[in-house]
Image (cartoon, coloured by chain):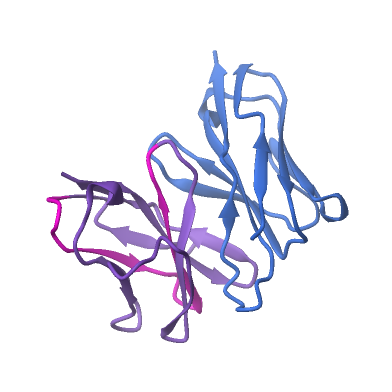
Chain colours: A purple, B blue
């Protein structure tokens, strides 16, 4: 069964550094999403992406965040200058029809 | 935006017991999904169920869209059922992106 994949599974970075989280959505899906989950809290929507552009974003998704689909398979989330409060699990998801399928997540730790 | 509330927040079960988890939502939904978050943090999709009833093995789910709630039933619980169960819903926003709003989850602990 096709699945969403994410790399890396864990990322440790220093405050102020840039990080890029990578996702490979399911191949025939057209809608892509990033969510995050701070430890012990609920999953929160960050951004949705369709037809090579952002379709919606939450108030969390400020100027420090950007998304890109650099080729036909990858979908990336970039955090320009990480803060301590960016430490979280980041999930990528893709959708075709009604169901969203989630990747296994990248655990980001900012020191 | 849509509000999603789950109950109970915590549940402890003896292995073999049955349980019902509830999800209330504040608006008409296009999409409702149930997820199990395992101890490794992965979100496992259990059901896509904006209305009606579905069953998958020991799990089943019912959504009554007109009354704005969904129920997840776990029968004959096993220790591997432990984890956090999330309900997530989407109300059509006009932009078509169908992003999900998650509840806070029900933390289930099944003890042998």
Please provide the residue range marked out in magenta: A13-39
Find out whether residue A19 is within the magenta segment: yes
Which residue in the rendered view is the most extreme toward the right?
Answer: B66
Quadrant hosting residue A39: top left
Left or right: where A52 falls relative to A65: right
Residue B10 at x, y percent in the picture: 59, 25
Residue B110 at x, y percent in the picture: 56, 20
Left or right: where A15 falls relative to A96: left
Tell me: residue B52, above or below residue A46.
above
Find out whether residue B18 is within the magenta segment: no
Tell me: residue B31, above or below residue A85.
below
Quadrant hosting residue B20: top right
Q: Can residue B62 be seen in this view?
A: no
Left or right: where B98 falls relative to A74: right
Q: Which residue is drawn at 80% across and 50% down?
A: B68
Quadrant hosting residue B28: bottom right
Residue A102 at x, y percent in the picture: 47, 58
Residue B98 at x, y percent in the picture: 60, 69
């Amino acid at each position: 069964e096709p699945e969403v994949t994410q790399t890396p599974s864990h990322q440790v970075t220093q405050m102020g550094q840039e990080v890029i989280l990578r996702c490979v959505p399911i191949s025939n899906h057209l809608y892509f999403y990033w969510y995050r989950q701070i430890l012990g809290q609920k999953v929160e929507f960050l951004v949705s992406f369709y037809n090579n552009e952002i379709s919606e974003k939450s108030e969390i998704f400020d100027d420090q965040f950007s998304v890109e689909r650099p080729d036909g398979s990858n979908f990336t989330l970039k955090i320009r200058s990480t803060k301590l409060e960016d430490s979280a699990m980041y999930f990528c998801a893709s959708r075709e029809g009604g169901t969203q399928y989630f990747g296994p997540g990248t655990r980001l730790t900012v020191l | 935006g849509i509000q999603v509330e789950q109950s109970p927040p915590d549940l402890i079960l003896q292995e073999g017991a049955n349980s019902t988890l509830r999800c209330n939502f504040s608006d008409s939904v296009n999409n409702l999904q149930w997820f199990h978050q395992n101890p490794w943090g992965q979100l496992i999709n259990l059901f896509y169920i904006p209305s009606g009833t579905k069953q998958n093995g020991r799990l089943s789910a019912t959504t009554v869209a007109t009354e704005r709630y969904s129920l997840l039933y776990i029968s004959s619980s096993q220790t591997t059922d432990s984890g956090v169960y999330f309900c997530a819903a989407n109300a059509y926003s006009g932009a078509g992106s169908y992003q999900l709003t998650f509840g806070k989850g029900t933390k289930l602990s099944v003890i042998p």
